[in-house]
Image (spheres, grey):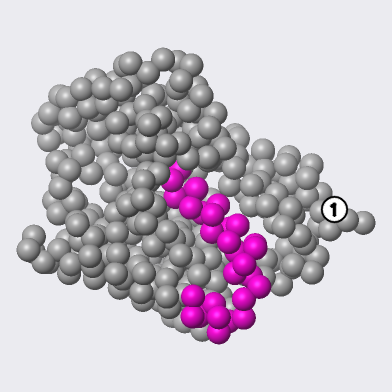
Amino acid sequence: MSTSSVALEPKRHYPILDGLRGVASVIVIIFHTFEVYSGGDPKKQILNHGYLAVDFFFLLSGFVVAYAYDDRWTRMNFLDFAKRRLIRLQPMVVMGSIIGAALFYFQGGSTFPLVAVTPVWKMLLIMLIGCTLIPIPVSWDIRGWQEMHPLDGPGWSLFFEYVANILYALVLRRLANRWLAVLTFVAGVFLLHMAITSHGGDVIGGWSITSLQLHIGFARLLYPFMAGILLMRVGKLITVPAGFATASLLLIAALCIPRIGSPNHVWQNGLYDALCILIVFPIIVAIGAGSSESDGKMQRLSKFLGDLSFPLYITHYPLIYIQTAWVMQSHPPLWKSIVVGVLLFVTAITIAYASLKLYDEPVRKWLSARYLHLRKPV
């Protein structure tokens, strides 16, 4: 029997880590909802450090991927691994691109002038490319933001997620801890240098196929992903009471703290970003993996947020495009902005939950049964 037909035994989940992913996803939605009101100035952004949720996701991914697969390579090959990761992630990547295409022409106007002049055939071509997560060059942009996935902006982080998974399968899983630690340290220095020398004093970026944006993207990816692998292998976890609540509060504080430093000392905020990624996020993950949550309501909330996290993250941004165009063109009063913001949040949750239950879970279940011989989705 080939390895591809062997069903690997299931492993227990870390429910608090799943819940923390959901907490971070909710903060991302709120962060993006407020973003348009900053006038393009990150220093004025409410929930200022919500962008660091992406770096937290990379750290979680390294931990979870290593936990799930490090000890399975004697019964699994690269193709098996690739199938499992594609089944887990790709259905919602496709859904995000389709939703982005369906809402694309509702985003036209002076804010996104390219939308009105983009022919349908080109938009559909970009949608199909987006379904594969292959990044498009700047010259193919159909919005004006130079995104590698202009129909669904957050797709850039999934592109880097796939890069990380390939690196893990081909290289990182083979490394002894001491060599992985050396690479993680080098990646940490790379990240620290990028953060404190960046023009804006932050780690924001990574969504374009340009030398600068790729520099930012790889700096944001490599340290947290490898640190997550190393943390899982070393096993230095932290146990605290009320684990989900404690870790969630720490994560919310880290992502919502106001901007650090003055305009003449932007490096201070870059240092804060780096310290969150280098130190604070590993501590939060160590708490989430090492603790338990005894409160039944918190357990149910953690599971709900964990289930919803990826669908919410990958489907919400087409709504943000529409909101951004509306705010920039109509300059609404405060009360209208609040109403629209609440409606956007509720709509994003609804779309994500419907996508999860009506599409993602059934599709992953079918793909798991068809290609992995599993009754439950991976």
Seen at 60% across and 35% down, the residue is 359
Residue 268 appears in the picture as rendered:
yes
* Amino acid type of the residue that numbered disc 1 sits on in the rendered structure: Ser
**Relative depth, front residue between 198 and 103:** 198
Magenta span main SS:
helix
Q: Is residue 1 magenta?
A: no
117 over 320 or under it: above or below = above
How many residues crowd around disc 1 within 10 Å: few (fewer than 14), some, or many (20 or more)?
few
Q: Is residue 346 visible?
A: no
Numbered disc 1: secondary structure: helix
Give the x, y percent position of residue 226: 50, 70
Q: Position of residue 165 (x, y in %)?
A: 58, 58
Q: Quadrant of residue 103?
A: top left
Residue pictured at 54% horizontal, 28% vertical: 128
- Describe residue 56's horizontal placement relative to residue 30 as left or right: right
Q: Nearer the viewer, residue 169 or 330?
A: 169
The residue furthest right is: 1
Q: Where does the magenta region start and end?
A: 154-183
User: What x and y, as percent, mark residue 55?
Assistant: 39, 61
Left or right relative to 279: residue 131: right
Residue 320 occupies quadrant: top left
Q: Position of residue 2 (x, y in %)?
A: 88, 56
Figure label count: 1
Q: Is residue 305 above or below residue 64?
A: above
Q: Is residue 173 magenta?
A: yes
Name the residue located 60 percent from the left edge and 57 percent from the top edge. 166
The residue tagged 1 is: 5
Q: Quadrant of the N terminus?
A: bottom right
Which residue is painted at 54% across and 77% down in the image?
180
